[in-house]
Image (cartoon, coloured by chain):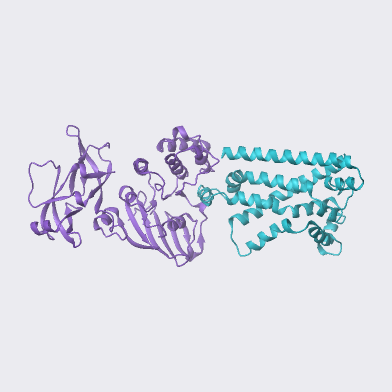
Amino acid sequence: MPESGTAPGLYVRLRQAAPFPLDVELACAPGELVALFGPSGSGKTSVLRAIAGLHLPPDALVRCGNATWTDTAAGHVTPPQRRSVGMVFQDYALFPHMSVREQMLAAMNGLARETREARVARLVAATHLGEFVDRRPGTLSGGQQQRAAIARALARDPAVLLLDEPFASVDRPLRDALHREFLALRHELRVPIVLVTHDFDDVTRLASHVVMLERGAVVASGSVGAVTASNRLPGVSEWREPAVALDGAVAAHDEARKLTTLAMPGAELFVPRLDAPVGAGVRVSIAAREVILATRRPVELSIHNVLAARVAGVEPALQTGSALVRLVAGEMPLLAVVTADAVEKMRLGAGIEVFALIKAMSIDTF
Amino acid sequence: MDWTSLVLSLELGVATVAILLPAAFLLARVLAFRRFRGSPVVEALVALPLVLPPTVVGFYLLQAFGAHGAFGRAVAGLIGHPLAFSFEGLVLASVLINVPFAVQPIQNALAAIPANVRDAARLSGMNTWQLVRRIELPLAWPGFATAFVLAFAHTLGEFGVVLMVGGSIPGETRTIAIAIYDRVQAFDEHGAGVMALVLLCLSLVALALTNVFARRSLRRA
Protein backbone atom coordinates (compact mmCIF):
# COMPACT_ATOMS: atom_id res chain seq x y z
CA MET A 1 0.00 0.00 0.00
CA PRO A 2 1.26 3.47 -0.78
CA GLU A 3 2.15 5.63 2.17
CA SER A 4 -0.35 8.34 2.95
CA GLY A 5 0.48 11.57 1.20
CA THR A 6 2.40 9.96 -1.64
CA ALA A 7 1.01 9.50 -5.12
CA PRO A 8 -0.45 6.04 -5.55
CA GLY A 9 1.01 5.80 -9.05
CA LEU A 10 -0.76 4.92 -12.24
CA TYR A 11 -4.00 2.97 -12.45
CA VAL A 12 -5.53 2.01 -15.80
CA ARG A 13 -8.70 0.11 -16.67
CA LEU A 14 -9.81 -0.05 -20.30
CA ARG A 15 -12.59 -1.88 -22.09
CA GLN A 16 -13.71 -1.70 -25.69
CA ALA A 17 -15.32 -4.12 -28.14
CA ALA A 18 -14.54 -2.39 -31.44
CA PRO A 19 -12.60 -1.83 -33.66
CA PHE A 20 -10.68 -4.53 -31.77
CA PRO A 21 -11.40 -5.94 -28.31
CA LEU A 22 -9.54 -4.53 -25.34
CA ASP A 23 -9.95 -5.55 -21.72
CA VAL A 24 -6.99 -4.44 -19.65
CA GLU A 25 -6.37 -3.44 -16.06
CA LEU A 26 -2.96 -2.48 -14.79
CA ALA A 27 -1.33 -0.56 -11.98
CA CYS A 28 2.17 0.83 -11.77
CA ALA A 29 3.68 2.39 -8.66
CA PRO A 30 6.30 5.16 -8.81
CA GLY A 31 9.69 3.60 -9.58
CA GLU A 32 8.15 0.47 -11.05
CA LEU A 33 8.43 -0.42 -14.71
CA VAL A 34 5.51 -2.38 -16.11
CA ALA A 35 6.20 -4.06 -19.43
CA LEU A 36 3.19 -4.49 -21.70
CA PHE A 37 4.26 -7.56 -23.60
CA GLY A 38 2.55 -9.29 -26.49
CA PRO A 39 2.59 -9.98 -30.21
CA SER A 40 1.86 -7.16 -32.64
CA GLY A 41 -1.85 -6.49 -32.83
CA SER A 42 -2.41 -7.48 -29.22
CA GLY A 43 -3.40 -3.94 -28.27
CA LYS A 44 -0.28 -2.89 -26.35
CA THR A 45 0.18 0.42 -28.13
CA SER A 46 -3.53 1.24 -27.78
CA VAL A 47 -3.20 0.87 -24.02
CA LEU A 48 -0.25 3.27 -24.05
CA ARG A 49 -2.14 5.75 -26.24
CA ALA A 50 -5.17 5.52 -23.96
CA ILE A 51 -2.97 6.44 -20.97
CA ALA A 52 -1.65 9.42 -22.93
CA GLY A 53 -5.15 10.49 -23.98
CA LEU A 54 -4.51 9.86 -27.68
CA HIS A 55 -7.02 7.02 -27.75
CA LEU A 56 -10.34 6.94 -25.95
CA PRO A 57 -11.99 3.55 -25.39
CA PRO A 58 -15.71 3.82 -24.57
CA ASP A 59 -15.10 2.45 -21.08
CA ALA A 60 -11.90 3.83 -19.61
CA LEU A 61 -10.48 4.91 -16.29
CA VAL A 62 -6.97 6.37 -16.11
CA ARG A 63 -5.69 7.82 -12.86
CA CYS A 64 -2.23 9.11 -12.14
CA GLY A 65 -1.36 10.17 -8.62
CA ASN A 66 -4.19 12.35 -7.43
CA ALA A 67 -5.25 13.30 -10.96
CA THR A 68 -7.98 11.52 -12.92
CA TRP A 69 -7.11 11.80 -16.59
CA THR A 70 -9.86 9.68 -18.10
CA ASP A 71 -13.11 8.62 -16.46
CA THR A 72 -15.68 7.79 -19.12
CA ALA A 73 -18.24 6.89 -16.45
CA ALA A 74 -18.07 10.47 -15.17
CA GLY A 75 -17.73 11.88 -18.70
CA HIS A 76 -14.32 13.31 -17.86
CA VAL A 77 -11.38 13.39 -20.30
CA THR A 78 -8.24 15.49 -19.81
CA PRO A 79 -6.74 16.38 -23.22
CA PRO A 80 -3.27 14.93 -23.91
CA GLN A 81 -1.44 18.26 -23.63
CA ARG A 82 -2.70 18.71 -20.07
CA ARG A 83 -1.58 15.26 -18.90
CA SER A 84 1.81 15.11 -17.27
CA VAL A 85 3.00 12.39 -19.64
CA GLY A 86 6.40 11.81 -21.19
CA MET A 87 6.14 9.52 -24.18
CA VAL A 88 8.79 7.93 -26.37
CA PHE A 89 7.27 6.85 -29.67
CA GLN A 90 8.36 3.78 -31.59
CA ASP A 91 9.81 5.83 -34.46
CA TYR A 92 10.77 8.52 -31.88
CA ALA A 93 8.55 11.18 -33.59
CA LEU A 94 11.18 13.88 -33.16
CA PHE A 95 10.41 17.33 -34.55
CA PRO A 96 12.43 17.33 -37.81
CA HIS A 97 12.93 21.11 -37.86
CA MET A 98 14.26 21.46 -34.31
CA SER A 99 17.64 20.73 -32.77
CA VAL A 100 17.79 18.32 -29.83
CA ARG A 101 17.98 21.32 -27.49
CA GLU A 102 14.98 23.02 -29.13
CA GLN A 103 12.93 19.82 -28.82
CA MET A 104 13.59 19.72 -25.10
CA LEU A 105 12.85 23.44 -24.64
CA ALA A 106 9.63 23.05 -26.66
CA ALA A 107 8.46 20.44 -24.18
CA MET A 108 9.01 22.82 -21.25
CA ASN A 109 6.72 25.67 -22.24
CA GLY A 110 5.83 27.99 -19.44
CA LEU A 111 8.86 27.28 -17.24
CA ALA A 112 11.38 29.92 -16.27
CA ARG A 113 14.39 30.18 -18.57
CA GLU A 114 16.91 29.18 -15.85
CA THR A 115 14.84 26.09 -14.97
CA ARG A 116 14.65 25.07 -18.61
CA GLU A 117 18.36 25.56 -19.27
CA ALA A 118 19.32 23.69 -16.09
CA ARG A 119 17.08 20.78 -16.98
CA VAL A 120 18.42 20.64 -20.54
CA ALA A 121 21.96 20.47 -19.16
CA ARG A 122 21.03 17.70 -16.72
CA LEU A 123 19.18 15.61 -19.33
CA VAL A 124 21.88 16.08 -21.96
CA ALA A 125 24.41 14.71 -19.47
CA ALA A 126 22.15 11.82 -18.46
CA THR A 127 21.51 10.80 -22.07
CA HIS A 128 25.07 11.40 -23.34
CA LEU A 129 23.87 13.86 -25.96
CA GLY A 130 26.42 16.58 -25.23
CA GLU A 131 27.99 16.97 -28.65
CA PHE A 132 24.71 16.45 -30.51
CA VAL A 133 22.55 18.93 -28.65
CA ASP A 134 22.52 21.49 -31.48
CA ARG A 135 21.96 18.96 -34.25
CA ARG A 136 18.69 18.12 -35.93
CA PRO A 137 17.25 14.59 -35.85
CA GLY A 138 17.99 13.99 -39.54
CA THR A 139 21.73 14.09 -38.83
CA LEU A 140 21.59 11.76 -35.80
CA SER A 141 22.07 7.99 -35.69
CA GLY A 142 19.26 5.71 -34.51
CA GLY A 143 20.70 5.44 -31.01
CA GLN A 144 21.18 9.21 -30.73
CA GLN A 145 17.59 9.76 -31.90
CA GLN A 146 16.35 7.34 -29.25
CA ARG A 147 18.30 9.22 -26.56
CA ALA A 148 16.92 12.53 -27.84
CA ALA A 149 13.38 11.15 -27.69
CA ILE A 150 13.92 10.02 -24.08
CA ALA A 151 15.43 13.40 -23.18
CA ARG A 152 12.44 15.22 -24.71
CA ALA A 153 9.98 12.93 -22.91
CA LEU A 154 11.70 13.61 -19.58
CA ALA A 155 12.04 17.35 -20.18
CA ARG A 156 8.53 18.01 -18.88
CA ASP A 157 9.40 16.22 -15.64
CA PRO A 158 6.39 13.97 -16.32
CA ALA A 159 4.32 12.15 -13.70
CA VAL A 160 4.44 9.02 -15.87
CA LEU A 161 6.83 7.83 -18.56
CA LEU A 162 5.47 5.83 -21.51
CA LEU A 163 7.78 3.97 -23.90
CA ASP A 164 6.52 2.41 -27.13
CA GLU A 165 9.03 -0.16 -28.40
CA PRO A 166 11.96 2.21 -27.87
CA PHE A 167 14.50 -0.53 -28.58
CA ALA A 168 12.79 -2.12 -31.58
CA SER A 169 14.54 -0.25 -34.36
CA VAL A 170 18.17 -0.56 -33.23
CA ASP A 171 20.48 -3.52 -33.79
CA ARG A 172 21.47 -5.87 -31.01
CA PRO A 173 24.85 -4.48 -29.83
CA LEU A 174 23.44 -0.94 -29.71
CA ARG A 175 20.30 -2.20 -28.01
CA ASP A 176 22.38 -3.77 -25.24
CA ALA A 177 24.20 -0.45 -24.74
CA LEU A 178 20.92 1.48 -24.73
CA HIS A 179 19.47 -1.02 -22.24
CA ARG A 180 22.36 -0.31 -19.86
CA GLU A 181 22.01 3.44 -20.29
CA PHE A 182 18.28 3.26 -19.73
CA LEU A 183 18.72 1.11 -16.59
CA ALA A 184 21.08 3.72 -15.15
CA LEU A 185 18.57 6.45 -15.96
CA ARG A 186 15.62 4.46 -14.69
CA HIS A 187 16.99 4.20 -11.16
CA GLU A 188 16.90 8.01 -10.97
CA LEU A 189 13.25 8.20 -12.01
CA ARG A 190 10.66 8.03 -9.27
CA VAL A 191 7.67 7.84 -11.61
CA PRO A 192 5.61 4.95 -12.97
CA ILE A 193 7.05 3.70 -16.27
CA VAL A 194 5.08 1.69 -18.83
CA LEU A 195 7.06 -0.01 -21.60
CA VAL A 196 5.47 -1.61 -24.65
CA THR A 197 7.55 -4.37 -26.20
CA HIS A 198 7.35 -7.59 -28.17
CA ASP A 199 10.92 -8.55 -27.19
CA PHE A 200 11.09 -10.61 -24.02
CA ASP A 201 14.71 -9.50 -23.48
CA ASP A 202 13.33 -6.02 -22.72
CA VAL A 203 11.12 -7.60 -20.06
CA THR A 204 13.92 -9.69 -18.55
CA ARG A 205 16.35 -6.82 -18.37
CA LEU A 206 14.29 -3.72 -17.65
CA ALA A 207 10.89 -4.49 -16.20
CA SER A 208 9.87 -4.92 -12.58
CA HIS A 209 6.43 -6.17 -13.59
CA VAL A 210 4.93 -7.56 -16.76
CA VAL A 211 1.42 -7.59 -18.20
CA MET A 212 1.10 -10.03 -21.08
CA LEU A 213 -1.53 -9.23 -23.66
CA GLU A 214 -3.12 -11.41 -26.30
CA ARG A 215 -5.87 -10.07 -28.56
CA GLY A 216 -6.47 -7.22 -26.16
CA ALA A 217 -6.81 -9.34 -23.04
CA VAL A 218 -4.42 -9.89 -20.14
CA VAL A 219 -3.23 -13.51 -20.20
CA ALA A 220 -0.57 -13.27 -17.47
CA SER A 221 0.73 -10.60 -15.13
CA GLY A 222 2.88 -10.18 -12.07
CA SER A 223 6.41 -9.38 -11.01
CA VAL A 224 9.02 -10.41 -13.56
CA GLY A 225 10.58 -12.78 -11.01
CA ALA A 226 7.29 -14.56 -10.31
CA VAL A 227 6.24 -14.64 -13.96
CA THR A 228 9.55 -15.99 -15.27
CA ALA A 229 9.78 -18.51 -12.42
CA SER A 230 6.29 -19.79 -13.20
CA ASN A 231 7.43 -20.38 -16.80
CA ARG A 232 3.78 -20.31 -17.80
CA LEU A 233 3.98 -17.57 -20.36
CA PRO A 234 1.46 -17.92 -23.19
CA GLY A 235 3.15 -17.24 -26.49
CA VAL A 236 6.60 -17.16 -24.88
CA SER A 237 7.27 -20.43 -23.07
CA GLU A 238 6.77 -22.31 -26.35
CA TRP A 239 10.04 -20.96 -27.75
CA ARG A 240 11.89 -19.26 -24.94
CA GLU A 241 14.32 -21.32 -22.93
CA PRO A 242 13.15 -21.30 -19.31
CA ALA A 243 15.08 -18.73 -17.28
CA VAL A 244 14.35 -16.96 -14.01
CA ALA A 245 14.88 -13.20 -13.76
CA LEU A 246 15.53 -12.06 -10.20
CA ASP A 247 16.42 -8.85 -8.41
CA GLY A 248 19.34 -8.64 -6.01
CA ALA A 249 21.89 -6.16 -4.79
CA VAL A 250 25.68 -5.94 -4.76
CA ALA A 251 26.79 -7.19 -1.32
CA ALA A 252 30.57 -7.17 -1.70
CA HIS A 253 33.40 -7.18 -4.20
CA ASP A 254 36.34 -9.57 -3.95
CA GLU A 255 39.03 -7.77 -5.90
CA ALA A 256 41.62 -10.56 -5.51
CA ARG A 257 39.33 -13.23 -6.95
CA LYS A 258 37.62 -10.79 -9.35
CA LEU A 259 34.20 -11.79 -8.04
CA THR A 260 31.15 -9.94 -6.83
CA THR A 261 28.78 -11.31 -4.21
CA LEU A 262 25.11 -10.57 -4.80
CA ALA A 263 22.57 -10.61 -1.99
CA MET A 264 19.52 -12.46 -3.28
CA PRO A 265 16.31 -13.33 -1.41
CA GLY A 266 17.53 -15.83 1.20
CA ALA A 267 20.67 -16.70 -0.74
CA GLU A 268 23.95 -15.37 -2.10
CA LEU A 269 25.29 -15.59 -5.62
CA PHE A 270 28.83 -15.19 -6.92
CA VAL A 271 29.17 -13.54 -10.30
CA PRO A 272 32.19 -12.17 -12.19
CA ARG A 273 33.28 -8.76 -10.85
CA LEU A 274 30.57 -6.19 -11.59
CA ASP A 275 31.20 -2.53 -12.20
CA ALA A 276 28.61 -1.34 -9.68
CA PRO A 277 28.88 0.07 -6.14
CA VAL A 278 27.98 -1.99 -3.09
CA GLY A 279 24.25 -1.70 -2.51
CA ALA A 280 23.41 -1.16 -6.19
CA GLY A 281 20.43 -3.13 -7.49
CA VAL A 282 21.23 -5.87 -10.00
CA ARG A 283 18.92 -7.92 -12.18
CA VAL A 284 20.15 -11.48 -12.76
CA SER A 285 18.84 -14.02 -15.21
CA ILE A 286 19.57 -17.71 -14.67
CA ALA A 287 18.77 -20.08 -17.53
CA ALA A 288 17.30 -23.40 -16.46
CA ARG A 289 19.74 -25.37 -18.61
CA GLU A 290 22.69 -23.77 -16.76
CA VAL A 291 21.57 -25.18 -13.40
CA ILE A 292 23.07 -28.52 -12.39
CA LEU A 293 21.57 -30.58 -9.56
CA ALA A 294 23.37 -32.73 -7.01
CA THR A 295 22.00 -34.74 -4.12
CA ARG A 296 25.13 -34.21 -2.01
CA ARG A 297 27.31 -31.12 -1.66
CA PRO A 298 30.05 -31.64 -4.23
CA VAL A 299 33.67 -30.81 -3.50
CA GLU A 300 36.63 -29.77 -5.64
CA LEU A 301 34.60 -28.18 -8.41
CA SER A 302 35.25 -24.99 -10.33
CA ILE A 303 31.69 -23.91 -9.65
CA HIS A 304 31.28 -20.98 -7.26
CA ASN A 305 27.59 -21.21 -6.60
CA VAL A 306 26.44 -24.27 -4.68
CA LEU A 307 23.02 -23.49 -3.27
CA ALA A 308 21.04 -25.67 -0.92
CA ALA A 309 17.58 -25.91 -2.45
CA ARG A 310 14.35 -27.77 -2.08
CA VAL A 311 12.46 -29.23 -5.04
CA ALA A 312 9.04 -27.64 -5.38
CA GLY A 313 7.89 -29.69 -8.35
CA VAL A 314 8.96 -31.68 -11.38
CA GLU A 315 7.34 -31.29 -14.80
CA PRO A 316 8.43 -33.93 -17.30
CA ALA A 317 8.35 -32.99 -20.98
CA LEU A 318 7.49 -36.30 -22.65
CA GLN A 319 8.59 -35.40 -26.17
CA THR A 320 12.13 -34.30 -25.37
CA GLY A 321 12.85 -36.74 -22.54
CA SER A 322 13.70 -33.81 -20.29
CA ALA A 323 12.10 -32.42 -17.17
CA LEU A 324 11.70 -28.96 -15.71
CA VAL A 325 12.53 -28.96 -11.99
CA ARG A 326 11.17 -26.13 -9.86
CA LEU A 327 13.43 -25.24 -6.94
CA VAL A 328 13.51 -22.81 -4.07
CA ALA A 329 16.91 -21.80 -2.74
CA GLY A 330 16.36 -19.74 0.38
CA GLU A 331 13.43 -17.66 -0.90
CA MET A 332 14.81 -17.58 -4.41
CA PRO A 333 12.91 -19.48 -7.10
CA LEU A 334 15.05 -21.37 -9.61
CA LEU A 335 14.35 -23.56 -12.60
CA ALA A 336 16.52 -26.44 -13.79
CA VAL A 337 16.19 -28.53 -16.92
CA VAL A 338 17.51 -32.07 -16.50
CA THR A 339 16.95 -35.33 -18.34
CA ALA A 340 14.09 -37.59 -17.36
CA ASP A 341 16.78 -40.15 -16.61
CA ALA A 342 18.35 -37.83 -14.01
CA VAL A 343 14.94 -37.34 -12.38
CA GLU A 344 14.69 -41.11 -12.12
CA LYS A 345 18.26 -41.63 -10.84
CA MET A 346 18.13 -38.83 -8.26
CA ARG A 347 14.52 -39.63 -7.31
CA LEU A 348 13.64 -35.98 -7.71
CA GLY A 349 10.25 -34.99 -6.43
CA ALA A 350 8.56 -32.28 -4.43
CA GLY A 351 10.19 -31.77 -1.03
CA ILE A 352 13.55 -33.40 -1.89
CA GLU A 353 16.62 -31.47 -0.67
CA VAL A 354 19.23 -30.93 -3.38
CA PHE A 355 22.12 -28.67 -4.26
CA ALA A 356 21.81 -26.34 -7.24
CA LEU A 357 25.13 -25.72 -8.99
CA ILE A 358 25.52 -22.60 -11.13
CA LYS A 359 28.72 -21.34 -12.75
CA ALA A 360 29.40 -17.70 -11.97
CA MET A 361 29.94 -17.21 -15.70
CA SER A 362 26.48 -18.59 -16.50
CA ILE A 363 24.59 -15.90 -14.61
CA ASP A 364 23.54 -12.97 -16.77
CA THR A 365 23.54 -9.66 -14.95
CA PHE A 366 21.92 -6.40 -16.04
CA MET B 1 2.28 49.17 -71.68
CA ASP B 2 -0.82 49.49 -69.49
CA TRP B 3 0.73 50.06 -66.05
CA THR B 4 -2.68 50.62 -64.43
CA SER B 5 -3.74 47.12 -65.44
CA LEU B 6 -0.52 45.59 -64.17
CA VAL B 7 -0.82 47.37 -60.80
CA LEU B 8 -4.50 46.34 -60.59
CA SER B 9 -3.56 42.70 -61.29
CA LEU B 10 -0.84 42.78 -58.63
CA GLU B 11 -3.28 44.34 -56.13
CA LEU B 12 -5.83 41.67 -56.98
CA GLY B 13 -3.19 38.96 -56.50
CA VAL B 14 -2.11 40.31 -53.12
CA ALA B 15 -5.70 40.75 -51.91
CA THR B 16 -6.58 37.24 -53.10
CA VAL B 17 -3.72 35.43 -51.34
CA ALA B 18 -4.09 37.60 -48.22
CA ILE B 19 -7.68 36.40 -47.82
CA LEU B 20 -7.22 32.97 -49.31
CA LEU B 21 -4.15 31.55 -47.54
CA PRO B 22 -5.41 31.81 -43.94
CA ALA B 23 -8.83 30.46 -44.96
CA ALA B 24 -7.24 27.71 -47.04
CA PHE B 25 -5.05 26.71 -44.08
CA LEU B 26 -8.07 26.28 -41.82
CA LEU B 27 -9.91 24.22 -44.45
CA ALA B 28 -6.79 22.20 -45.36
CA ARG B 29 -6.18 21.45 -41.68
CA VAL B 30 -9.66 19.99 -41.28
CA LEU B 31 -9.36 17.96 -44.49
CA ALA B 32 -5.84 16.71 -43.66
CA PHE B 33 -6.43 15.68 -40.04
CA ARG B 34 -10.12 14.83 -39.69
CA ARG B 35 -12.19 12.17 -41.34
CA PHE B 36 -15.85 13.08 -41.17
CA ARG B 37 -18.96 11.98 -42.96
CA GLY B 38 -19.08 14.84 -45.44
CA SER B 39 -15.36 15.11 -46.18
CA PRO B 40 -15.53 13.58 -49.71
CA VAL B 41 -18.22 16.13 -50.60
CA VAL B 42 -16.13 19.01 -49.23
CA GLU B 43 -13.08 17.79 -51.12
CA ALA B 44 -15.13 17.60 -54.33
CA LEU B 45 -16.41 21.17 -53.78
CA VAL B 46 -12.83 22.36 -53.19
CA ALA B 47 -11.69 20.81 -56.48
CA LEU B 48 -14.71 21.99 -58.47
CA PRO B 49 -13.13 25.20 -59.89
CA LEU B 50 -10.43 23.00 -61.48
CA VAL B 51 -12.91 21.27 -63.78
CA LEU B 52 -15.69 23.84 -64.30
CA PRO B 53 -15.34 26.16 -67.33
CA PRO B 54 -14.47 29.67 -66.06
CA THR B 55 -17.50 31.07 -67.84
CA VAL B 56 -19.78 28.76 -65.85
CA VAL B 57 -18.18 29.89 -62.57
CA GLY B 58 -18.46 33.48 -63.75
CA PHE B 59 -22.11 33.04 -64.66
CA TYR B 60 -23.08 31.70 -61.24
CA LEU B 61 -21.06 34.39 -59.47
CA LEU B 62 -22.77 37.07 -61.53
CA GLN B 63 -26.12 35.56 -60.56
CA ALA B 64 -25.11 35.60 -56.90
CA PHE B 65 -23.74 39.17 -57.09
CA GLY B 66 -26.87 40.46 -58.82
CA ALA B 67 -29.34 42.77 -57.09
CA HIS B 68 -32.00 40.04 -57.38
CA GLY B 69 -30.32 37.70 -54.88
CA ALA B 70 -30.31 38.13 -51.11
CA PHE B 71 -26.49 37.85 -51.01
CA GLY B 72 -25.98 40.47 -53.73
CA ARG B 73 -28.40 42.89 -52.02
CA ALA B 74 -26.84 42.37 -48.59
CA VAL B 75 -23.28 42.99 -49.80
CA ALA B 76 -24.35 45.94 -51.95
CA GLY B 77 -25.97 47.46 -48.86
CA LEU B 78 -22.74 46.88 -46.93
CA ILE B 79 -20.19 48.31 -49.39
CA GLY B 80 -22.45 50.86 -51.05
CA HIS B 81 -22.38 49.49 -54.59
CA PRO B 82 -23.09 46.18 -56.34
CA LEU B 83 -20.38 43.51 -56.30
CA ALA B 84 -20.64 42.87 -60.03
CA PHE B 85 -18.20 44.92 -62.14
CA SER B 86 -16.30 46.11 -59.03
CA PHE B 87 -12.84 45.39 -57.61
CA GLU B 88 -14.37 43.84 -54.47
CA GLY B 89 -16.43 41.49 -56.63
CA LEU B 90 -13.29 40.57 -58.53
CA VAL B 91 -11.44 39.76 -55.27
CA LEU B 92 -14.29 37.56 -54.08
CA ALA B 93 -14.46 35.73 -57.42
CA SER B 94 -10.68 35.36 -57.48
CA VAL B 95 -10.62 33.92 -53.96
CA LEU B 96 -13.31 31.37 -54.82
CA ILE B 97 -11.79 30.11 -58.08
CA ASN B 98 -8.35 29.82 -56.43
CA VAL B 99 -9.54 27.63 -53.54
CA PRO B 100 -8.14 24.37 -55.02
CA PHE B 101 -4.79 25.98 -55.89
CA ALA B 102 -4.33 27.05 -52.26
CA VAL B 103 -6.04 24.23 -50.34
CA GLN B 104 -4.52 21.23 -52.07
CA PRO B 105 -0.79 22.03 -51.66
CA ILE B 106 -1.30 23.03 -48.02
CA GLN B 107 -3.44 19.96 -47.35
CA ASN B 108 -0.81 17.68 -48.89
CA ALA B 109 1.98 19.34 -46.88
CA LEU B 110 0.00 18.99 -43.63
CA ALA B 111 -0.93 15.38 -44.37
CA ALA B 112 2.78 14.63 -44.86
CA ILE B 113 3.47 15.51 -41.22
CA PRO B 114 3.62 12.16 -39.40
CA ALA B 115 0.70 11.71 -37.00
CA ASN B 116 3.17 10.71 -34.29
CA VAL B 117 4.95 14.06 -34.59
CA ARG B 118 1.70 15.92 -33.89
CA ASP B 119 0.92 13.50 -31.04
CA ALA B 120 4.40 14.12 -29.64
CA ALA B 121 3.75 17.87 -29.80
CA ARG B 122 0.53 17.41 -27.82
CA LEU B 123 2.37 15.31 -25.26
CA SER B 124 5.03 18.02 -25.07
CA GLY B 125 2.23 20.16 -23.68
CA MET B 126 1.43 22.23 -26.77
CA ASN B 127 -2.10 23.57 -27.18
CA THR B 128 -3.65 23.88 -30.65
CA TRP B 129 -2.24 27.34 -31.29
CA GLN B 130 1.30 26.25 -30.26
CA LEU B 131 0.94 23.10 -32.35
CA VAL B 132 0.04 25.22 -35.39
CA ARG B 133 2.74 27.82 -34.83
CA ARG B 134 5.64 25.60 -33.76
CA ILE B 135 5.02 22.37 -35.67
CA GLU B 136 2.45 22.60 -38.47
CA LEU B 137 3.41 25.94 -40.06
CA PRO B 138 7.20 25.34 -40.05
CA LEU B 139 6.78 21.83 -41.46
CA ALA B 140 4.08 22.70 -44.02
CA TRP B 141 5.87 25.83 -45.20
CA PRO B 142 6.77 24.49 -48.69
CA GLY B 143 3.05 23.80 -49.20
CA PHE B 144 2.30 27.44 -48.35
CA ALA B 145 4.93 28.64 -50.81
CA THR B 146 3.40 26.51 -53.56
CA ALA B 147 -0.10 27.69 -52.67
CA PHE B 148 1.04 31.31 -52.73
CA VAL B 149 2.68 31.08 -56.15
CA LEU B 150 -0.09 29.03 -57.74
CA ALA B 151 -2.87 31.27 -56.46
CA PHE B 152 -0.99 34.49 -57.24
CA ALA B 153 0.06 33.43 -60.75
CA HIS B 154 -3.38 32.04 -61.47
CA THR B 155 -4.96 35.33 -60.35
CA LEU B 156 -2.71 37.32 -62.71
CA GLY B 157 -3.61 35.01 -65.57
CA GLU B 158 -7.33 34.42 -64.94
CA PHE B 159 -9.40 35.62 -67.85
CA GLY B 160 -12.83 34.06 -68.21
CA VAL B 161 -14.19 34.67 -64.73
CA VAL B 162 -12.74 38.18 -64.61
CA LEU B 163 -14.36 39.10 -67.89
CA MET B 164 -17.74 37.70 -66.81
CA VAL B 165 -17.78 39.23 -63.33
CA GLY B 166 -15.71 42.37 -63.79
CA GLY B 167 -15.92 43.38 -67.40
CA SER B 168 -13.08 45.69 -68.41
CA ILE B 169 -13.29 48.94 -66.41
CA PRO B 170 -9.88 50.65 -66.37
CA GLY B 171 -8.46 50.96 -62.84
CA GLU B 172 -11.35 48.96 -61.40
CA THR B 173 -11.64 45.59 -63.13
CA ARG B 174 -9.35 45.67 -66.17
CA THR B 175 -6.58 43.25 -65.17
CA ILE B 176 -3.47 42.72 -67.25
CA ALA B 177 -4.89 39.55 -68.80
CA ILE B 178 -7.96 41.50 -69.94
CA ALA B 179 -5.76 44.37 -71.12
CA ILE B 180 -3.75 41.99 -73.31
CA TYR B 181 -6.99 40.69 -74.83
CA ASP B 182 -8.18 44.29 -75.45
CA ARG B 183 -4.86 45.21 -77.13
CA VAL B 184 -5.09 42.18 -79.41
CA GLN B 185 -8.70 43.09 -80.27
CA ALA B 186 -7.43 46.59 -81.14
CA PHE B 187 -4.68 45.08 -83.39
CA ASP B 188 -2.00 46.56 -81.02
CA GLU B 189 0.30 43.55 -81.26
CA HIS B 190 3.28 45.43 -79.83
CA GLY B 191 1.37 46.54 -76.72
CA ALA B 192 -0.01 43.04 -76.19
CA GLY B 193 3.46 41.55 -76.71
CA VAL B 194 5.12 43.79 -74.09
CA MET B 195 2.48 42.99 -71.49
CA ALA B 196 2.58 39.27 -72.29
CA LEU B 197 6.35 39.33 -71.83
CA VAL B 198 6.06 41.13 -68.47
CA LEU B 199 3.54 38.52 -67.30
CA LEU B 200 5.76 35.71 -68.52
CA CYS B 201 8.82 37.07 -66.70
CA LEU B 202 6.85 37.68 -63.47
CA SER B 203 5.56 34.13 -63.50
CA LEU B 204 9.02 32.66 -64.15
CA VAL B 205 10.63 34.67 -61.36
CA ALA B 206 7.89 33.72 -58.91
CA LEU B 207 8.20 30.02 -59.71
CA ALA B 208 12.00 30.12 -59.50
CA LEU B 209 11.85 31.88 -56.13
CA THR B 210 9.47 29.32 -54.64
CA ASN B 211 11.63 26.48 -55.86
CA VAL B 212 14.67 28.05 -54.19
CA PHE B 213 12.77 28.58 -50.92
CA ALA B 214 11.23 25.13 -50.97
CA ARG B 215 14.60 23.49 -51.56
CA ARG B 216 16.22 25.52 -48.81
CA SER B 217 13.53 24.64 -46.30
CA LEU B 218 13.80 20.97 -47.28
CA ARG B 219 17.53 21.07 -46.66
CA ARG B 220 16.98 22.63 -43.25
CA ALA B 221 14.50 19.96 -42.25
Tell me, yes or no, if residue B50 can be seen here: yes
For residue B23, side relative to residue A237 (left or right): right
Tell me, yes or no, if residue A262 can be seen here: no
Q: Nearer the viewer, residue A152 or A346?
A: A346
> If the image is split into quadrants, where does the C terminus of chain B sit?
top right
**Residue lying at 85% horizontally and 43% vertically, measured from the top left:** B5
Q: Nearer the viewer, residue A173 or A243?
A: A173
Which residue is the extreme one toward the bottom?
A17
Q: Nearer the viewer, residue A84 or A220?
A: A220
Q: Residue A351 is drawn in which quadrant?
A: bottom left
> If the image is split into quadrants, where does the N terminus of chain B sit?
top right
For residue B114, side relative to residue B94 (left or right): left
Query: Could you tell me residue B169's position as x and y percent?
Result: 89, 49
Q: Colour of chain B?
A: cyan
For residue A136, side relative to residue A254 (left or right): right
Query: Could you tell me residue B95's position as x and y percent?
Result: 75, 52
**Looking at the image, how many numbered discs can be counted on the residues?**
0
Relative vertical location of residue A137 with respect to residue B25 in this rendering, above or below? above
**Residue lying at 11% horizontally and 53% vertically, measured from the top left:** A354
Query: Could you tell me residue A225's position as x and y percent?
Result: 26, 53
Chain given the colour purple: A
**Residue lying at 35% horizontally and 50% vertically, measured from the top left:** A32
Which residue is the extreme one toward the right?
B186
Q: Residue A299 is drawn in which quadrant?
A: top left
Query: Could you tell me residue B106's position as x and y percent?
Result: 64, 49
Q: Nearer the viewer, residue A30 or A254?
A: A254
Relative vertical location of residue A103 with respect to residue B112 in this rendering, above or below? above
